[in-house]
Image: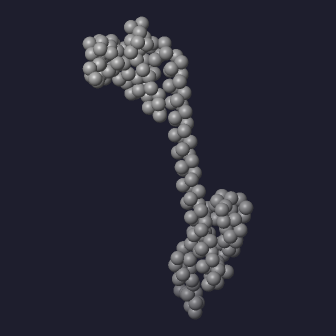
Amino acid sequence: MAYLRGRFLAHGSLSLASGRTHLEFVLPVEEARELCERLRQFDMGASWRVRRGRGVVTWKSVETVGTFLRLVGGGAALLELEARQVSRSVRGDLNRVINAESANLQRAVAAAARHLEAIDALEADGRLAEQPYVVRLVADARREEPEATFSELAERLGLHRSAVQRALDRIERLALHPDEGVEKRGRGPRRR
């Protein structure tokens, strides 16, 4: 371990720039081979290559770099590496949540716009007045609160969320298909 610590202090560098972890040793070629053999003894296989006549031993794996820092007593650098990993993970999670919420909001706004357009179309040709009470009630609530979610409308009206959704689906369907839901006039009930 003292050998590894010495090699790192004399020839190593750790880069944590822009979310990428990179630890490398720049040594004479013969020492690079020897270092790789010693690292394999600790189950930390590293790749090496020759760059400008020098041997370069490299790790880009966060887990391997963390194991190495723990092994050689690089506690402060290990804490910095772990803090950056946690920060990166939290940022990623936060971005996923924000993106999901943004997509949900866009869908809700688009749905509300379709509902209002359908309500206006049914109102214009008088078909809204022919609809059941719950459908008319939901249509009025949607007009008053176009930004409300189904759950918010349901709570406000004292209905189940599914009843609100069915009413708004019916409104959209009727607006798209004007003949749907129109009863045939002139025929009485069938008798058997």
Render colour scheme: one colour
Q: Residue furthest top?
A: 2
Q: Decide: is 127 above or below 62.
A: below
Relative to residue 34, is residue 80 drawn left or right? Answer: right
Q: Which residue is pictured at 56% across the width and 55% down the height?
A: 104
Relative to residue 18, is residue 158 drawn left or right? Answer: right
Q: Residue furthest front?
A: 52
**Can you say which quadrant of the picture contains the N terminus?**
top left
Foreground residue among 2 and 148? 2
Q: Is residue 160 visible?
A: no
Q: Which residue is pictured at 68% across the width and 74% down the height?
A: 136
Image x and y of residue 111, in percent: 57, 65
Q: Which residue is pictured at 44% across the width and 26% down the height?
A: 15
Image x and y of residue 35, in percent: 32, 13
Q: Is residue 29 visible?
A: yes
Foreground residue among 151 and 103? 103
Q: Decide: is 78 above or below 105.
A: above
Image x and y of residue 133, in percent: 69, 74
Q: Quadrant of residue 123?
A: bottom right
Relative to residue 40, is residue 98 drawn left or right? Answer: right
Q: Quadrant of residue 33?
A: top left
Q: Which residue is pictured at 59% across the width and 74% down the height?
A: 118
Foreground residue among 14 and 1? 14
Foreground residue among 134 and 122? 122
Q: Residue furthest bottom?
A: 186
Marks counted in the figure total 0
Q: Decide: is 156 above or below 82.
A: below
